Amino acid sequence: MALPIRKKYTGNGVQTQVTVGAVSEAAASFNVAATTGWPATFPFHIVVDPGTSKEEKMLVTGASGTLLSVTRGVGVDGTSAAVHEVGAVVYPVFTASEADEANQIASVMTTKGDLITTDGSTINRLAKGADDYVLISKASATNGIKWESVATVALQGPQGATGSQGPQGFQGATGPQGSQGATGSQGATGPQGATGATGATGATGPQGATGSQGATGPVNTDENATNSTAALRTSVGQLKATTFSATDSASTTPFAQAGSFTYIGLNCARVTNSSTVYSDVVSGRTVLVGSSASTLGTASSSRRYKENIQTATISSADVYNLRPVTFDYNNLVTAESDEWKYNQHGLIAEEVEETSLKFLISYDDAGLPRHIKYELLAIPLLATIKEQNQRIIALEARLTQLENN
């Protein structure tokens, strides 16, 4: 039998009607209203005027929009070409001839072992070969294949295809672990973390024993000083102020003016021309004053005078936030001259008090911030410089490592 042509089907082809004009018996194409749900590829069968005396089944071989190209004639379910008027019903169908093609294929096989083959234009039956024969490809055979004996195939036939690979075997036991390799070089040190908060201040240790009093220093005198001599050093590390009257001399002028003056120190430096040795608020250089207003001194730095020594914890962020300002002293401050009153530079004690650098602040009797111990400001600055230097060293190490890689 001839090779069947595969037909196209859909399960939702919608019924439509003939349009434009009547379909003559010889027409090879005609228009329909729509092809909704119809197969998108060809060929497939349709029926026109179903259930009437003019029922005709056609093979649609192509379409341009709703214009159908068809093959007609006797043989499609026994129907014949007819004239179909506008409005005639049309829809896709499965035909008896298509079902018969499947039956014809099945009917070709008649004997056990039969094969269905083709020579390219018809469907043929290839009967089963003799026992122990094998099926081989043979270009000269009608269907391109034939049965041959095993012996003939073994001597003359082409090499068979490579068989499929067998299943993978079980994995063998793991061998002993090798010795550990040498440890790689250590990476560069990471940047230093932020400084932690300052810890609580420890309890004050017991006061050491008072040292022996040093020898009394020399006494300065002035031929123009009366009532008393210059300041006396009363004990080690202390200078006592003294008040005396100064008179002018006809031959020399040791003082800028005559009157009652207070002097301090071994070389008799003038403080004020009144009995006040220390002014609580005064513009000028930093002076260290003891618990008594008549005692002056310096801050000792030797380890001999210290105990409970610990490394200070300084917040670099607080150092960065210090705000240097320029200012003029107001009328509450007694300044020696305009040089010490106007266009001054410094910090604001209340702003410093809000940071962890409160140790720079001195307070008055009411507990309010008054002075900044500028002589101690170098301590947090030194700690900040050291921290920045450590970060620079770490960054240089990382840069060197990146360059070497």
Image: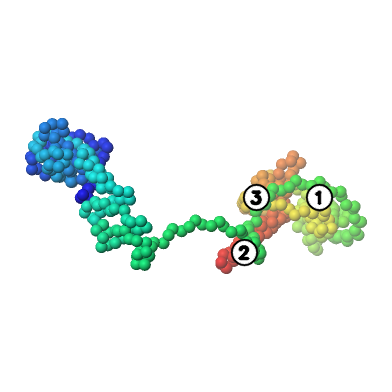
Task: Determine the image quadrant of residue 400.
Answer: bottom right
Instruction: Please report the residue visible at 10 percent of the width from the left and 36 percent of the height from the top.
Output: 84
Between marks 1 and 2, how big is the CA–CA gap? 49 Å
User: Is the residue 253 above or below the residue 318 in the image?
Assistant: below
Helix, strand or loop at mark 2: helix
Between 338 and 273, the one lying in front of the other is: 338
Query: Is 201 displayed left or right of 28 in the figure?
Result: right
Q: Position of residue 344 (x, y in %)?
A: 64, 53
Q: Which mark is nearer the camera, 1 or 3?
A: 3
Q: Amino acid at mark 2?
A: Ala
Q: Position of residue 166 (x, y in %)?
A: 48, 57
Instruction: Please report the residue visible at 24 percent of the width from the left and 52 percent of the height from the top.
Output: 124
Decide which of tag 2 and tag 3 comes sooner along the chain: 3
Query: Is 298 displayed left or right of 2 in the figure?
Result: right
Q: Which mark is nearer the camera, 1 or 2?
A: 2
Could you tell me which quadrant the C terminus lies in? bottom right
Decide which of tag 1 and tag 3 comes sooner along the chain: 1
Residue 360 shows up from this direction: yes
Helix, strand or loop at mark 3: helix
Between 156 and 174, the one lying in front of the other is: 156
User: Would you call the spot at circle 1 few (<14 residues within 10 Å), some (14-19), or many (20 or more)?
Assistant: few
Residue linked to disc 3: 318
Q: Amino acid at mark 3?
A: Asp
User: Would you call the spot at circle 3 few (<14 residues within 10 Å), some (14-19), or many (20 or more)?
Assistant: some
Decide which of tag 1 and tag 2 comes sooner along the chain: 1
Q: Would you say the residues marked 1 and 3 are in contact, meaning their CB atoms lie under 8 Å apart?
A: no
Disc marking residue 397: 2
Disc marking residue 290: 1
Instruction: Please report the residue visible at 87 percent of the width from the left and 50 percent of the height from the top.
Output: 207
Instruction: Please report the residue visible at 22 percent of the width from the left and 50 percent of the height from the top.
Output: 3
Q: Position of residue 305 (x, y in %)?
A: 83, 56
